Image: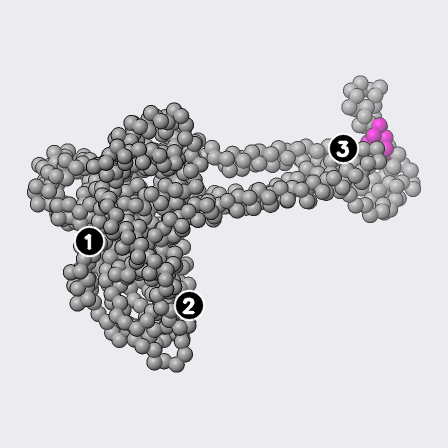
Amino acid sequence: MAASEENSALFPIFILTIMALPLVPYTIMKLCRAASRKTKSIHCQCSECTRSGKYRRSIFKRISNFSTCSNLTLVLLWVVMIILVYYIKHISQEIQIFEPFSILGLESGASDSEIKKAYRRLSIQYHPDKNPDPEAHKYFVEFISKAYQALTDPISRENYEKYGHPDGRQGFQMGIALPQFLLNFDGATGGILLLWIVGVCILLPLVIAVVYLSRSAKYTGNYVMHQTLSTYYYFMKPSLAPSKVMDVFIKAAEYMEIPVRRTDNEPLQKLFMLVRSELNLDLKNIKQEQAKFWKQHPSLVKTELLIQAQLTRESATLSPALLGDFRRVLELSPRLLEELMKMAVIPRTSQGHGWLRPAIGVVELSQCIIQAVPLSAKKAAGGSPEGIAPFLQLPHFSEAIIKKIARKKVRTFQELSDMPLQERAELLTQTAGFSSAEIQDVEMVLEMMPSITIVVTCETEGEEGIQEGDIVTVQAWVTLKRTNGLIGALPHAPYFPFHKEENFWFLLADPVSNNVWFSQKMSFMDEAAAITAASKAIEDTMEGSGASVKETSAAVREAVDKVKAGSRLVMGKLQAPAEGNYNLSCFCLCDSWIGCDKKINLKVKVVKRTRAGTRGGPVAEEGPILEDGVEEEEEDEGEEYDDYESEYSEDDADEQRTSKKGAVANGKAHNKGSQNRSSSESSGTDEE
């Protein structure tokens, strides 16, 4: 019975251990993530961002941010652990090992006279005739009397001093740390233990595995549904115009799950009238176009209207129910756009190339959603190839103010940003009527906007020139600089209700064939991860080229210094195509800022193979996949709709200028881009 009680007392310790094994590491991981997020919270301090309230650290917002399902579960488990610790400490005081000398208050080896004196002294204190307390009576009978008997009996005392127990040598006992009620079912102990083992060791892991597998079968590692990826892959086309990217984006399965209520009809009708000009409807047949629009799936209609409410900044007109759906749509948009971008650049052709035109359209849609700028604002107007969209992301700017500034010969965003501070302040004061506080907001945002520099090389490691079939190494250093000196910061986005880190996409593409040869996502927020990645890449490259340890260390130190100065290393490999001269373009596209993209031209010469062997197998010719894409593009060109031209659209004259510039050295290409906020200003090859 004593052994059973002891095993039952160990059950809370067993549960505490099982809980602590996963809970403690998970808590440490959560705290580390929270600390890393706190270090990244450098954001815009303009009045519009402050007024938006998303950076305000009020007590209610902190509670709402903390009150997630995972955090509340974590707190509940820690409360249970604390209760278990208190309970274990309490029962450990109740469970006492029978030690006669300690009970009588004597030291080991005391004489008989000392034992009798101690017994008489404790009898006066705990004997039932002297102390009527029931607890005192229990303690006297179960402990004091037994201790005295064990020490006065010569055999019992000898056994205790020799074996540590009055009854002599004790056999080895094993127990199970289970509660006592599971072991006292009138001989049914075996069945209870069997049920316990089956439940804990088989059923519980099975339930956890089923839940995990069902979730993993539905979602990817980026918490995007597999059905969404399949839909994006199916509807992504090489000729997808930027204005048509929206039609693919809203088909995400996550958006299809947003409920469409009957009470939403009237608010959506009002919203439709406000954003109708942005829906690419044919004004000549407006009634038929409207009827066609409303015949779509209700979830598609609702999602597109809510996104248009963000682009046109009409969210204030939404009902409370629609406002919750509106926030849900925007919360999902960054990761859905990232997956849509991956579907655009995923290898599709026989040579493993993605598609450039839809990739640019996805990035432009992301920029417009984050900055709450209509897609129509990106139409080229007034001598500005990127339209008025870059102006609209500045605080206090509107179309009327942009027109006033244009009358003063400031038609492009680059011209405004390149103006001296005093001259720009006078322009905004006299022409736009800005106050000093509003001018300060504009200057603050201009200082936050990134300026990008690209230095890229394409070469075959250990060989002179690039031959067809070679494995070409693409290495690019992308440098970000801001006027305020920051490197990693959250973008100015007062109309986007969530924290959004700025990410960049590096694309090496052939605009003529619409092929993306190489793509990679990068960020300037996590410097430690960038240092680790750059160091490993440089170390592997140097070791592969046979460099010494000293040379490798020097190259790694140089790379680390570049990363700390605001550069990021982009490195990858691709197979050289067939013999010929290729006029490529390097894009660095930001998913958060408008007008901060960078584009430089790069000429690559691939010569006929003369070296023995091949470096990646035979060169495959363009397959039917590309031909289908070309045919589909020709068909789409005949379709009539109001579309805007992307700022990266190039005409024949641009291609001719590109072919006359750039340096080619027997197949080795090297180019460097200068700092520029507007990608449209760098269509030619920049000089160092």
Q: In which quarter of the image is the C terminus?
A: bottom left
Residue type at mark 1: give it. Answer: Ser
Mark 2: which secondary structure? helix
User: Residues at badges 2 and 3 in contact (C-beta under 8 Å)?
Assistant: no
Front-most of 646 and 209? 646
Which colour style is shown?
one colour
Residue 12 in view of the camera: yes
**Residue 582 screen position, x and y as percent:** 26, 67
- Magenta run includes residue 145: yes
**Residue 402 screen position, x and y as percent:** 14, 39
User: Is residue 678 found left or right of 251 in the rendered image?
Assistant: left
Magenta residues span: 141-148
- The residue that mark 2 highlights is 540
Residue 680 is marked as 1
Front-most of 349 and 497? 349
Q: Which residue is drawn at 31% across and 77% down?
A: 608
Residue 360 in view of the camera: no
Q: In this view, does 551 lie above or below 410?
A: below
Q: Residue at x 55, y 44 (%)?
A: 214
Label 2 neighbour load within 10 Å: few <14, some 14-19, many 20+: few
Mark 1: which secondary structure? helix
Residue type at mark 3: give it. Answer: Phe
Magenta residues, dominant SS class? helix
- The residue that mark 3 highlights is 181
Q: Quadrant of the N terminus?
A: top right
Mark 3: which secondary structure? helix
Sequence-first disc among 2 and 3: 3
Residue type at mark 2: give it. Answer: Asp
User: Is residue 477 found left or right of 93 in the rendered image?
Assistant: left
